Image (cartoon, rainbow, N blue to C red):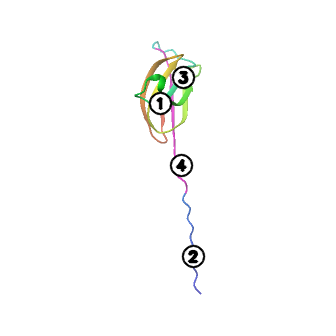
């Protein structure tokens, strides 16, 4: 009698890990800026009015923000107050990053 074993292997699906970005927005005097928008775009070369923002968060009363589940890539992070952009910074995010910007 011959026994035949059949092994079934299932591959676990790859889980893409996104990034988390956090920081504090302050004015030139070092005071926290509450209720300003922190926006993430990859549209660096487009005029501001044509940019698409992939993530947008709002600062709390102490100027702190956290953007979770940001897809890895190269971004320009723009701080906006009202209709004007107050500041920006370029950042590269990798899977699993927990970055302060």
Give how far apart the Cα atoms at labels 1 and 2 are. 53 Å
Q: Are marks 4 and 1 in contact (CB under 8 Å)?
A: no
- Left or right of residue 99, residue 61 in this image: right
Q: Secondary structure at mark 2?
A: loop
Residue mark closest to the camera, 1 vs 3: 1
Q: Could you classify mark 2 by the number of other residues whose Cα lies within 10 Å: few (under 14), some (14-19), or many (20 or more)?
A: few
Mark toward the viewer: 1 or 2 = 1
Q: Is residue 15 magenta?
A: yes
Residue drawn 45% across and 20% down?
87
**Alpha-carbon span between mark 1 and mark 3:** 13 Å
Q: Earlier in the sequence, mark 2 or mark 3?
A: 2
Mark 4 or mark 2, which is nearer the start of the sequence? 2
Dominant SS of magenta comes to: loop
Look at the numbered disc 4 and give the secondary structure of its residue: loop
Q: Earlier in the sequence, mark 4 or mark 1?
A: 4
Q: Residues within 10 Å of mark 3 (few under 14, many from 20)?
A: many
Q: Could you tell me if the residues under marks 3 and 4 are in contact, i.e. CB atoms within 8 Å?
A: no
Tell me the crowding category of disc 4: few under 14, some 14 to 19, or many 20 or more residues within 10 angstroms, Cα based: few
> In the displayed structure, would residue 82 be above or below residue 8?
above
Q: CA distance from mark 2 to mark 4?
A: 31 Å
Nearest to viewer (mark 4 / mark 1): 1
Residue 15, disc: 4
Q: Residue 2 at x, y = what percent?
A: 57, 84
The answer for how far apart the CA atoms under marks 4 and 1 are is: 23 Å
Q: CA distance from mark 2 to mark 3?
A: 60 Å
Cβ–Cβ under 8 Å for marks 2 and 4: no
Question: Are dots 2 and 3 in contact, CB under 8 Å?
Answer: no
């Amino acid at each position: 009698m011959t026994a035949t074993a059949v092994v079934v292997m299932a591959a676990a699906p790859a889980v893409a890990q996104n990034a988390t970005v956090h920081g504090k927005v302050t004015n030139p005097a070092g005071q926290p800026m509450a209720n300003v928008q922190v926006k993430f775009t990859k549209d660096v070369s487009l005029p501001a009015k044509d940019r698409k923002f992939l993530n947008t968060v709002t600062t709390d009363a102490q100027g702190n923000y956290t953007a979770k589940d940001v897809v890895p890539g190269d971004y320009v992070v723009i701080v906006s107050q009202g209709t004007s952009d107050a500041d920006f910074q370029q950042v590269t995010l990798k899977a699993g990053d927990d970055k302060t910007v």
